[in-house]
Amino acid sequence: MRTRSREPQTLGSDGTLERMARILAARNIDPAAVTSVEEPEPAPLDALLTRIPSRYQGAVADHPKALAWVREVAEAAVAPGIGARRQVATGPSLLMAGVVGAGKTWQAYGAIRRLVQEGIGVRWRATTAADLYAELRPGSDTDSERVLASYSRVPLLILDDLGAARSTEFVEEQTYRLINRRYNHELPTLVTTNLRIGDLRAHLGDRVASRLSQMTERVEFEPVDRRRQRRAA
């Protein structure tokens, strides 16, 4: 049996568009009602930079434990198909504790940049704990359950400034729900906090502290405000 080879066609070529037109006509679909082909996605690092806050677009992860975390997450990445780029799936989490300005958030964004530079696909989100609680608070214009699900299920999450919000039953409950879901599914999470690690239990409750203790490698930064150091230099 002989097979006829066909030249590969790029998306948007005349042959591809003609074939699409025939398919649409066979299904009685007006081609004019179909939106045009989207522009190619930007390079992974370029796409990443559009989502990182401008202050952190040059972030570099250079802390030994942040680099170790990157290696472990990269090793755990899996390809969804033959020839596909490996994607962050499951992996360890990192809890970075230190005073305001110690460089925790810088290391977190730098770690994501490093993963992308190593060719790993990263679907991620970032939020401060205070912003997250504002989105989840009853009476907001958003669907709080859908918001929580989106942060709970994303393969990689930066949860910044955990413990900065005033401790209430609502804060403790929502933090528990988020951390518990990510703990159960072993989803990599970069957590930063200004609290000393020993104070997390009193602020967030036993259930949250216990899960964070098991799911994260802990890093305590030197008690130095690097922002003030840079301004003074």
Image: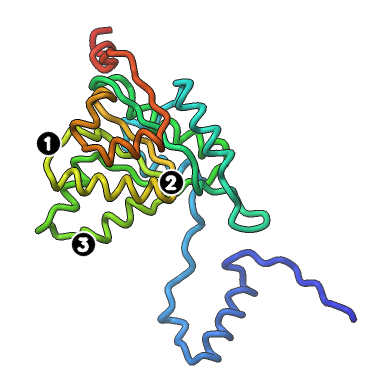
Residue 146 placement (x, y as % from top left) = 27, 61
Q: Earlier in the sequence, mark 1 or mark 2?
A: 1
Q: Is residue 196 above or below residue 90?
A: above
For label 2, the residue is 187
- Dot 2 lies on which element? loop
Camera-side residue: 106 or 214? 214
Please, what is the three-letter code of the amino acid marked with disc 2? Leu
**Do callouts 3 and 2 mark residues in contact (Cβ within 8 Å)?**
no
Q: Which label lies toward us, 3 or 1?
A: 1
Q: Earlier in the sequence, mark 3 or mark 1?
A: 3
- Dot 1 lies on which element? loop
Labelled disc at residue 156: none
For label 1, the residue is 166
- Dot 3 lies on which element? loop
The image quadrant of residue 172 is top left
Q: Is residue 60 above or below residue 86?
A: above
**Do callouts 1 and 2 mark residues in contact (Cβ within 8 Å)?**
no
Residue 20 placement (x, y as % from top left) = 57, 79
For label 3, the residue is 143
Q: Earlier in the sequence, mark 3 or mark 2?
A: 3
Q: CA distance from mark 3 to mark 2?
A: 23 Å
Residue at the (84%, 77%) spot, across then down: 3
Q: Quadrant of the N terminus?
A: bottom right
Residue 103 placement (x, y as % from top left) = 33, 22
Q: How many marks?
A: 3
Camera-side residue: 20 or 224? 224
Horizontally, is 151 left or right of 82 in the view? left
Q: Which label lies toward us, 3 or 2?
A: 2
Q: CA distance from mark 1 to mark 2?
A: 26 Å
Residue at the (26%, 17%) spot, across then down: 227
